[in-house]
Amino acid sequence: MNNIIDGTKVAFKIREQIKNLIEKEKITPQLAVIQVGDNKASDVYIKNKKKACEEVGIKFELIKFNTTISEELVINEIKRLNNDISVNGILVQLPLPVGFDEGKIINEINPVKDVDGLTYQNVGNLVLENDCLVPCTPLGVMELLNAYNVSLASKNVCLVGRSNLVGKPLIQLLLKANATVSVCHSKSLDIKNYTKQADVLIVAAGHPNLITKDMVKEGVVIIDVGINKEGNVLCGDVDFEEVSKKSSLITPVPGGVGPMTVSCLLKNVVKAYKIQN
Ligand code: NAP
């Protein structure tokens, strides 16, 4: 099928561009990741980030604490990294263990080093359309649409999911691109009314097969952000088999948005370096 969006290919191209830029400009950006506890999924995500950083020439440091660490000591570590001029990006791996105040901890990160784009300052700047560090997955979605020349101006874009990490930043990015945006969530009644009208449908709900072929119109562009595990198989939120027959473009899972998230993190680290230098 030639309607499949190849996220792995686009993500690889971005990594090559970053690698070339780092070599050409002889710069040494550095990312520090703080991990608290031993979440197995986080271990995998961090390993992927480390590998991607090292491949393009970004220095990677992991600061790992066990769950007995106090919130205050985590914040002290963030303050130390804020003051370390060799560190350009700081990322607190989420979720933090129960009992840690994620908002409070993340907002200790200096906004110019906040490569996840989650501090209040970056969130506010995104809403106000000021240049800022934008969360990696929403950025990856926009980069994918751009790579496949999907124009958004005046288009009906339906977003399923309104999380702080994915859905809400996407609302802002889509509005900035002059799309007409409708947003569905778990309390929406009959989301088919909205998904059916979409020229572009972006789904980030975390429910396998939430979107079925009767819910989309012919020729729709589908971006499936969801990552779900069914047995040992990864799948998205869209019934790919059936919906892909009606769509003009569609992302697979895996191999769609996932690889773009890591590439956009690398982009943000380089952007943070440039802001600081
Ligand atoms: P989240 O924080 O759990 O948010 C899910 C959102 O979907 C919420 O807004 C929720 O509504 C909405 N929702 C849940 N069930 C729904 C339903 N039946 N109908 C309509 N809306 C529904 O999740 P997230 O962090 O945004 O992640 C969403 C998915 O993307 C997950 O599968 C996650 O693994 C994946 N993800 C992928 C990447 C990547 O790199 N590809 C990155 C991040 C996340 P309420 O607000 O009403 O609860």
Image (tube, grey):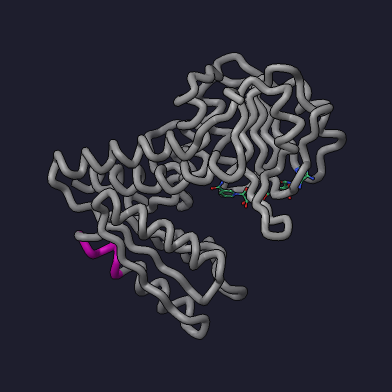
Q: Which residue is more in the foreground, 51 or 146?
A: 51
Residue 260 lies in the magenta-colored region:
no
Q: Residue furthest bottom?
A: 68
Relative to residue 67, is residue 60 drawn left or right? Answer: left
Residue 107 placed where, x, y %? 45, 59
**Total labels drawn:** 0
Name the residue located 51 percent from the left edge and 27 percent from the top edge. 145
Characterize the magenta stretch by its predominant secondary structure: helix
Name the residue located 38 percent from the left edge and 53 percent from the top edge. 114
Judge whether 210 appears above or below 28 on screen: above
Q: Residue furthest front?
A: 1
Judge whether 218 appears above or below 8 on screen: above
Residue 132 placed where, x, y %? 38, 40
Name the residue located 51 percent from the left edge and 76 percent from the top edge. 37
Residue 226 visible in the displayed image = yes
* Residues in magenta, as a range: 80-85
Relative to residue 247, is residue 275 drawn left or right? Answer: left
